[in-house]
Image (cartoon, helix red, strand yellow):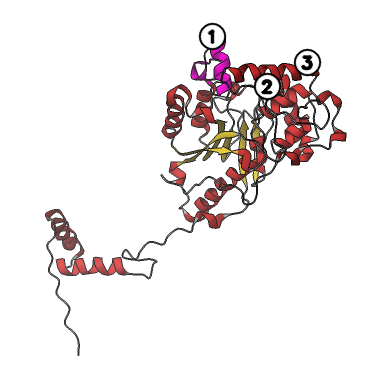
Amino acid sequence: MTKEPAQLNIRVPKPIHSWVQRASKRSGLSQKAFVVSLIEEAMDRSKGPSLFDKPETPPAVAQFDGEMPFRFIDLFAGIGGLRIGLQRNGGRCVFSSEIDPYAQKTYRAWFGEEPAGDIQDFVSGEGIPEHNVLAAGFPCQPFSIAGVSKKKSLGRDHGFKDKAQGTLFFQLATIIENKQPEVLLLENVKNLRSHNKGDTWRTIHGRLCDLGYAVFDQTIDAADYVPQHRERIFIVGFRRDIYGETPPFEFPDPPEGSRPIFRDILEPPENVPAKYTLSDHLWNYLQEYKKRHAAKGNGFGFGMTDLDGISRTLSARYYKDGAEILIPQKKGGPRRLMPLEAARLMGFPQEYAENQVVSDTRAYKQFGNAVVPLVAEAVAKQITKVMKWQRLTLPQS
C-alpha cells in the first residue's frame, strides 16, 4: 500500500515567499513542487556531500610534516642563520642581500654566492626573483636594550627615529608590498615588543596586517637548542587571500630531552691558544669593575659561565673583552671563547664553524648578530607544514 506524502505546513518570510512565487512560475511547477525539488536537490549525494551533511574537518596540520620544496629570499642575511633553517626544510634560496662586506665574505665562503648589497637598491622589487617565503633578520640595534642605551648616552635617535637603521623596516615593508610573498619569516630582538612603550611593535604589526598578512609572533629562548640564553622574537605572516584569516600555524614546542650544556661546545684545553686567556690587566679591571657596581647594588660585570649550564647571550661586542661569557680555567685567569666555539654556541654546523675567513674581531661581531640556525629550522618546519596543508586542503586559485 502506497503511503500518502507527509504534510508540512510552514510559514516563510515574505521575501522568500515572493521569490518562490516567481521562480516556480518560471520553472512551470507549482509552488509546492518547486520547493520539494529544491529540497531533493540539496539532499542529493550523487555529486558529493549534500547541503545537509556536516563538512569534513580538514586534516590536522601536524599530518603534513616533512620536507617541501619552496623558493625563498634572505634579506639582511648576516651570515645565513635563517637561510640554513629554511634550506633544511626544503627551501632553495633565490636571492640574498647583506650590506656588510665582512658578512658578505663569510656568506660567500659558506654558501658559494655573493649577496647583493644595500637592500634599499631593491625596494621596488626589481631584481628580486619570485619566491614563496621572504626571510629577514632586519636590523635590531635600533630596538635592542644595548643599542637604545648606547644611543641615548650619545644623544642619538633610536628605533624608527634612527634614520640609518630604524627606517629599514619600512623599506622591507615596501618590498613585501611590491613582491607579495605568500609567507614571511622575520626575526628581531625581544625588546622590539616593549620599545617606545609598545608603539614600535604596534606599528610593525599593524603594517604587516595592512599588507594582507595573518601575523603570528613569539619570543623564543634559544637555550632549548644551544647552551646560551638568547631570547629573540620571531614573526611569521601568511597571506590571508591564500591561507585564509586563521591559518593553523603554531610555533614549535621545545625539543624533547635535556638541554645542551656549555661544556659540549668547548675545545679541549690543549687546543686553545694562549691568546684567548685574558691578560692579568684586563682580568683585574673586570673584577674591580664588578665590585664597584656590586657596591652600588648593580648587577653589571663579567659572567663566569657554569660549564654544566648555559651562558649569557653572545653579543656583537664580545670582541672587546669577552666579559659576558668567560670560561674558567684550572690554571690562571679565565679565557674568552674561540671563534670556533662561538660558532658552535650559536648552533652553526661544524663545517661552517671551521671555515673562518675573517678576523676574530669580525667573527665575534658576526656570531653576536646572527640567528640561531636550529631555532630558524624549528620555526621553518612549522611554516612548511602550513604550506603543505594549504596546497593539499584548500582550493587553489
| Disc 2/disc 3 C-alpha distance (Å) | 19 Å
Q: Is residue 44 above or below residue 208?
A: below
Packing grade of label 3 (10 A; few <14, some 14-19, many >=20) is: few
Question: Which residue position holds label 2?
Answer: 317
Q: Which quadrant of the rendered structure holds the N terminus?
A: bottom left
Nearest to N terminus: mark 1 or mark 3: 1
3 in magenta: no
Return the x and y of residue 81 as percentages of the image width and height.
66, 35
Q: Identify the amino acid type marked 2.
A: Arg
Residue at 48% over, 29% down: 193
The answer to whether one can see residue 94 in this image is no
Return the x and y of residue 226 as percentages of the image width and height.
67, 40
Residue at 53% over, 33% down: 179
Question: Which residue position holds label 3?
Answer: 281
Q: Nearer the viewer, mark 1 or mark 3?
A: 3
| Disc 1/disc 3 C-alpha distance (Å) | 31 Å
Q: Identify the amino acid type marked 1.
A: Gly
Q: Nearer the viewer, mark 2 or mark 3?
A: 3
- Relative placement, left or right, of 288 versus 136 is right
Nearer to us in this view, 10 or 156: 156
Nearest to N terminus: mark 1 or mark 2: 1
The magenta segment is: 145-167
- Residue 299 picture quarter: top right
Q: Of the numbered discs in the image, which one, if any, rests on residue 155?
A: 1
Q: Of the numbered discs in the image, which one, if any, rests on residue 342?
A: none
Q: For mark 3, give the secondary structure.
A: helix
- Relative placement, left or right, of 269 versus 241 is right
Q: Identify the amino acid type marked 3.
A: His
Q: Marks 2 and 1: in contact by CB < 8 Å? A: no
| Disc 1/disc 2 C-alpha distance (Å) | 20 Å
